[in-house]
Amino acid sequence: EEGDVPVKLDANENPYQFSERLLQELFAELAVLPLNRYPDPNARDLKEVLAAKLDITADRILLGNGSDEILQALMLPFWSEGAKLMVPVPTFGMYAIIGRMVGYEVLAVPLDDAFDLCADEMISLAGREGVKLIFLASPNNPTGNCFSEERIIALLEQTDAVVVVDEAYAAFSGQDFLPKLARYENLVVLRTLSKIGLASLRLGMMFAARDLVYEVNKARLPYNVNSLSQKAAAFILERDGELCEQVARIVEGREWLVSEMRNIPGIHVYHSDANIILFRTPGPDKEIFRRILEQGVLIRNLSRPGRLYNCFRVSVGTEEENRLFVAALRKSLAG
């Protein structure tokens, strides 16, 4: 059963736990929270921590119960009959899923051969179709690479759409669009704590122009971020030394994995700026997935006709998990 697999490298999580000392300090903070009271509906303390850390004013921040909730809240104010949004493909599936649920027509534009944006085609289509929103995951999931900054800026400058840059994996990449908020009123940046080690808190963050945050906030459900998540996130962000060390270990693990995987005959490994690695195998995909799973390692089978045929995605694990995965991959190809 997939749920009982010892090595889970399918969900893009940080594999490391915080130290016992830090956890005990955190639990002591959480223990005094008045659980009989509703949380601060505006999460003011957490916003102040984020504002100081990211050099942005609190009125440019909106928080959600994970980024998925923010995606829905962001789509609602821009919707009208016949509204359209645009995504490159392949990308994170929830943009299209939530978009269709809200009532948008979703326009999908394939990425180029390097998995970068076909910006000219997207600009032309956005103008012709009156696209309201463009969603870009950079680094992208499942491909792992950052989109070129110049092409993202071209979309910001040459379309009338709100361009949403989802930086869920930004901690692993070095690309940062937050400083560009001051220049582009049509830019929205999304971040999350899920990929860097706090997935269970379900905390998504949106950064945008004040007027845009004000409008999206009208669609946000009340008390959407619970007190435990607010307190825990603020606590960890103010003491982020361990978090930064873990991110550095994951980046180091990614480079080791890429190097090892590229030494395996028949495997094509794509460049990654995230904590995930996309790779293609000779196939057949279901058989390779089964063989790897039988060795106690769970990865994500992405195979479908087209660009992702016989492709898999693996999350970067601990040093031991990475070694076990590479051994399982080698053995699965040996038959």
Image (cartoon, rainbow, N blue to C red):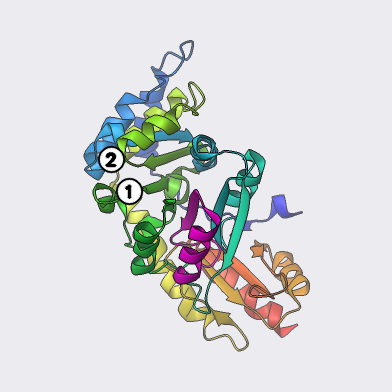
Circle 1 residue: 242
The spot of residue 304 in percent (x, y) is 72, 69
Q: Judge whether 266 appears above or below 60 on screen.
A: below
Q: Is residue 124 left or right of residue 96?
A: left
Q: Is residue 162 magenta?
A: no
The spot of residue 332 in percent (x, y) is 70, 77
On residue 255, the disc is: none
> In this rendering, does residue 100 appear at all?
yes
Q: Is residue 69 left or right of residue 301?
A: left
Q: Is residue 123 magenta?
A: yes
Circle 2 sits in a helix, a strand or a loop, which is it? loop
The spot of residue 65 in percent (x, y) is 50, 34
Q: Judge whether 146 appears above or below 21 on screen.
A: below
Circle 2 residue: 239
Q: Is residue 184 left or right of residue 68?
A: left
Amino acid type of the residue that numbered disc 1 sits on in the rendered structure: Glu
What residue span does the magenta drawing correspond to?
119-143
Circle 1 sits in a helix, a strand or a loop, which is it? helix
